[in-house]
Image (cartoon, rainbow, N blue to C red):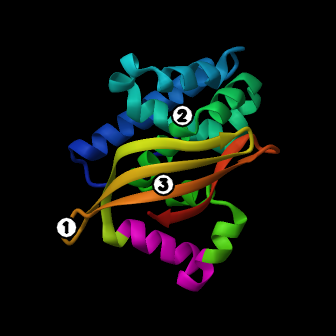
Amino acid sequence: MIYFEVKPIGKVAVMNKLNKLVLFSLITLIGMSSTGCGTLVKIAGSKTSRRVVTGIVAQVALECAMNGCFGDEAAAKELQESPKIFIEAHFQAINNGEYTKTWNSLSPSFHERQAPKGGYAGYVQWWRDDVNQVSINSINIEQQTPNSAVVDTLLTFHKHSGSSPSMKIRLHLIWEEQSKRWLIDESESI
């Protein structure tokens, strides 16, 4: 049985529910296939289809990254070779208010560095209470090995206060082999 949160119904709430339903359907339909999330990861990387399914595929890509791509080695390889997909999915999840999921995509050392700033509570407070939405203006892979990546991003933070500052942020990613997913190990303004 599927349960949804009860929220005031508006255009965004309805679209979020529809996206979750379509996401659930996609996962259900492809979950047992041999191509699994690998197919969705390839779709996410396709410039042609990205406009049509970006939100849903980004959610699936993050789900794959968080859950080891449902045991799909081909999908794990695609994600490992494409940290850009993970970054897009990560910020989409933040925009969707999925803070636990995005917190879990941060490395243990990132969590430790966040402790003086309030840990998880401080993380959620920043994204929920200060930032209304984050837009990705650019993503550039500066360095990549099979186990790490350095990714430069240009992000715009649309704040509840009405301001929308843009910042260049460098993300240091590490590949967690056991769960076959990227983790953000460090972020810094550049």
Q: Main secondary structure of the magenta part?
A: helix
Label located before the other in sequence (1 or 2): 2
Whether residue 1 is visible to the viewer of this picture, yes or no, is no
Magenta stretch, residue numbers: 114-128
Q: CA distance from mark 2 to mark 3?
A: 13 Å
The residue at the point 42 percent across, 46 percent down is: 92
Across and down, in percent, residue 1 comes to 57, 37
Q: Which mark is residue 163?
A: 1
Are circles 1 and 2 on residues that touch, CB within 8 Å? no
- Amino acid on which the number 2 mark rests in the picture: Val
Label 3, residues with CA under 10 Å away: few <14, some 14-19, many ≥20? some
Q: Position of residue 165 (x, y in %)?
A: 26, 64
> Upstream in the sequence, badge 2 or badge 3?
2
Q: 14 above or below 41?
A: below
Q: Closer to us: mark 1 or mark 2?
A: 1
Query: In the visual, does 165 lie left or right of 117?
Result: left
Residue marked by disc 3: 98
Marks 3 and 1: in contact by CB < 8 Å?
Answer: no
